[in-house]
Structures are given as structure tokens and as C-alpha cells.
Amino acid sequence: HIGDISVQNGIIYAPIENKPETDPLVLLYDAETLEYTGTYYAVDWTHLKDGIAWCAADENYLYTSQFNEADKIIVYNIDDMSLSHIVELSETVYRVQAGDVVDGKAYLNCDPKGVNKTVYEVDLATGETTLLFDRNTTGFDTEAEGISVMKDENDELVFTISDYNKIVSTFIRTYKLK
């Protein structure tokens, strides 16, 4: 299983998991050619008992969490994937499928059971966790998947989220907070 990827400085960071009880890996790919660079890291899975479903990179760190019952974000040094520190969340979030990092905040795309999917914001300095918004996937048997967050020309956050309909297709949806 390849989890939700992240791109930083021309490198794609791809979290790879086989079984939860085996070491999770992060493989590096060239973002322009999509070729595997030959570099991978077996990350410390002490805090990743159910695999590595996502990762998000910035200049210094790679972030991830447990998939189910995430009560912390695990932060690795980007240069060697050694454990840097842990960000304890102020509340537990469930079924974290994807994440992205912008300006010191992590945005988590979660897949709770039912048609309403959730996006949480986590302050990476304090761990304060806030439900940012719910998304109604209109009754389809849909699973929340990837998330990409960026700022538009007005410095407002834009969320691009992918959902997988287990019967028909993949949906790409864009959201802005009002």
C-alpha cells in the first residue's frame, strides 16, 4: 500500500506499508521524472502500530501519525528520518488517511464511518486539534484519501481532497473556508 505522498524540494516522499506489523518505509522519488531515487528509509514504527497511511514534508521534517486512533503526530528529521519529536494532539482523531502541512499547521483528512468525512487542523507547536470542517460525500460508499493544502492569491487556504468510491471512481474536490 502506498499512502498519501508529499512533495518537497523536488522529491516525492512516499509512505509504503505492507502489513501493520512490519517496518513502514518512506521511499524517495524524483518529482520531475517520477523515477525512484534509490533511497528509502525504514522509519521507527514504535508509534506507528497500524502502518504509515500518510506523510507530509516541509523543509526540516516529515510528519505522520497512526491511522486509527491518532493521538499524536510523529515528526522525523527530513535528512535521515530519525525521530525528532512527538506532537501530542489535544484530542484523538480517527482513521487519518492523509495529511499536509502549511505554516506550522497540519491538516488531516479523516475517514470516519458514514458519509460525513472530516478535516482537522493541528497546531504543530501546541498540539491543539480543531475540527475544521465536515464533508458530506453524498451517500456513496466513499473512502477519504489524499489531501493537498495551499494558499491562494488572497492568502486563503484551498483544500484539494481525493475520495475513492469503492464501486465506480475517484473524486477530486476543492474546498475553501468562508
Image (tube, helix red, strand yellow):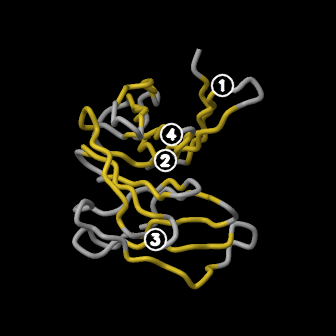
Which badge, 3 or 4, comes first in the chain's sequence?
Answer: 3
> Which secondary structure lies at badge 3?
strand
Residue drawn 41% across the image and 44% down it: 143
- Amino acid residing under circle 4: Gly
Residue drawn 45% across the image and 60% down it: 3
Left or right placement of residue 5 versus residue 1 in this view: right
Q: Position of residue 92 (x, y in %)?
A: 24, 37
| Label 2 neighbour load within 10 Å: few <14, some 14-19, many 20+ | some
Which mark is on residue 57?
A: none
| Label 1 neighbour load within 10 Å: few <14, some 14-19, many 20+ | few
- Amino acid residing under circle 1: Glu
- Amino acid residing under circle 3: Val
From the image, state whether disc 3 or disc 4 is nearer to you: 4
Which mark is on residue 164?
A: 2
Which badge, 4 or 2, comes first in the chain's sequence?
Answer: 4
Which mark is on residue 156?
A: 1
Which badge, 2 or 3, comes first in the chain's sequence?
Answer: 3
> Gap between marks 1 and 2, in whole Å?
26 Å
